[in-house]
Image (cartoon, grey):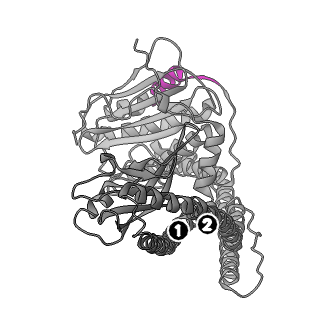
Amino acid sequence: MVHLRSSPGSRRLPDSLRRGLTFWRRSIQARVVASTLVLSAAVISVVGWFLLQQTRDGLLDHRVDAVVAEANDETTGARELLASSADTGNDAAQQQQSLAGIIIQRGQTRGFSVVLVGPALPGGRIADGGTIFTSGLDTSSVPVSLEEHFDDSQTTAWTYTTIRSTSGGTVTETPGIVVGSQVLLPADGRAYTLYYLFPLDEQEETLALVTRALLTAATLLLVLVAGITWLVTRQVVTPIRMARQVAERLAAGQLQERLKVSGEDDLARLATSFNQMASNLQRQIRQLEELSRVQRRFVSDVSHELRTPLTTVRMAGDVLHDARAQFDPATARAAELLQTELDRFETLLADLLEISRFDAGAAVLELDDVNLVDVAHRIVDATRPLADQRGVHVLVDAPDHPCLAQADVRRVERIVRNLVTNAIDHAAADGPDAIVVHVGGDDHAAAIAVRDHGVGLAPGEASMVFNRFWRADPARARTSGGTGLGLSIALEDTHLHGGWLQAWGRPREGAQFRLTLPRRAGGVLRHSPLPLVPTDVTEPVS
């Protein structure tokens, strides 16, 4: 025996998730709100990103203009200072120290750092020495790309950078702008490079404040959009839900239900049209019910009323039939034909009364434990004279043990009798091939299948054989005295038991009818113990 393990994906979903998925599938309002929120979030994200970029660029452009102007002012002041001290006789080192001290002191009061490098030589770098800078500043904050600018140019230049500084053993990094320009020391007439490093703390805080404000506004806007969408869709969905509820009640038979109409908009006109449709359907259904009731009453009344004259005709027919030996051959034959047709007429009346009871819903079951094996043997024994007359052998293929089902034995015998006589009627013209009545059962169902090797059924006829008065071959005579209602009554009897009555057939290969009943009354059938297609037939491979 092979045991199959269920994979984690095949396990049942949690109840909350399953309820959520059900709500999502069934609620168009939730899907509309969700899709609106997703689209709104996408639009707000794009607009917010654009606004942040514009704000960032505006803040940085303004700050760049300010720091470049301030750096130019500092450089101009440094040049004026150097020019005023040109004839003091200080050497280059003293002038450099004096200049750097003054600018560094100004930077500490104005919030920027200073690096003084010199003398400027092609390919020279800050790391080569001769550098004076603000205390705690890491000179690597000056990008190499800006240093390379002054290898072949003396114009003022700027760039973005990360300002690194050390305070109490802690290294901090701050985004900033560095501006570089050159001055000439009178002491040696050589160029020295000044780097001004301006932090962007205020701009960073401003941008963070704007970002928080945009996020807060976006969140509130999404909540507002969700609420508005929910209210708007509710106005549209509520009438649709009401229409669905009314439609369900109409389908359940409450034909007096109508929609409440308010206003003159499209939904109101839809409700009006819906109510008109419901009224028309109610009227037509009432007419059909009345017509059906009249038809059932007519069939029942005619069947009952025909019994009295039929009884009289039957008595007269019996007298003539009993005295047929005294008649001439033609009259004797007429008496025999009269007796045969009277038998068929009585059977037809009985079938019509039974059909009228089915149509009126008055048919009831008298349940008992029925052994289908015994039913099959009884029916075969009862129909053996007819089979012998037609030259057909009828066999029973049944298990040795009983095959029980809770059923109405009278109705089950009538079903099987109709199937067997139908098989005899259609198998007789094609030779003496045996008709086999198969019986089988399991824990849930019991079945009887009648197999014949007669004319068979053409494609599509298997679903039509149970129609009232339907005949596969209209030119074929009914040799067993059938009325054309036997299979229809058999199908109604089967439905009354909650079972299946199915047919299979193929031209020149015969047919098989299968009756399947639940073992317990009220049980639900999921399969049949016997195959519908006979085991002696090979189905074509598609």
For residue 373: magenta? yes
Measure the alpha-carbon separation of dots 1 and 2.
8 Å
Using the image, tell me which numbered label, if any, was put on residue 185. Answer: none
Q: Give the amino acid at mark 1.
A: Leu
Is 397 on the left-hand or right-hand side of 278?
A: left
Q: Residue furthest bottom?
A: 264
SS state under label 1: helix
Identify the residue under disc 1: 52
Magenta span main SS? helix
Out of 48 and 129, give the one closest to the viewer. Answer: 129
Q: Amino acid at mark 2?
A: Val
Q: Look at 68% across and 54% down and name the residue there.
A: 360
Residue 399 location (% of width, % of height): 44, 15
Q: Is residue 394 magenta?
A: no
* Above or below, comparing residue 298 to residue 140 in the picture: below
Identify the image quadrant of the N terminus. Answer: top left
Helix or strand or loop: what does disc 2 sit on?
helix
Is residue 291 among the parts visible in the rendering? no
- Quarter holding the C terminus is top left
Q: Categorize mark 1 by other alpha carbons within 10 Å: few (<14), some (14-19), many (20+).
A: some
Confirm or deny contact between disc 1 and disc 2 (CB under 8 A): yes
Query: What's the mark number on residue 210?
Result: 2
Q: Position of residue 392 (x, y in %)?
A: 32, 31
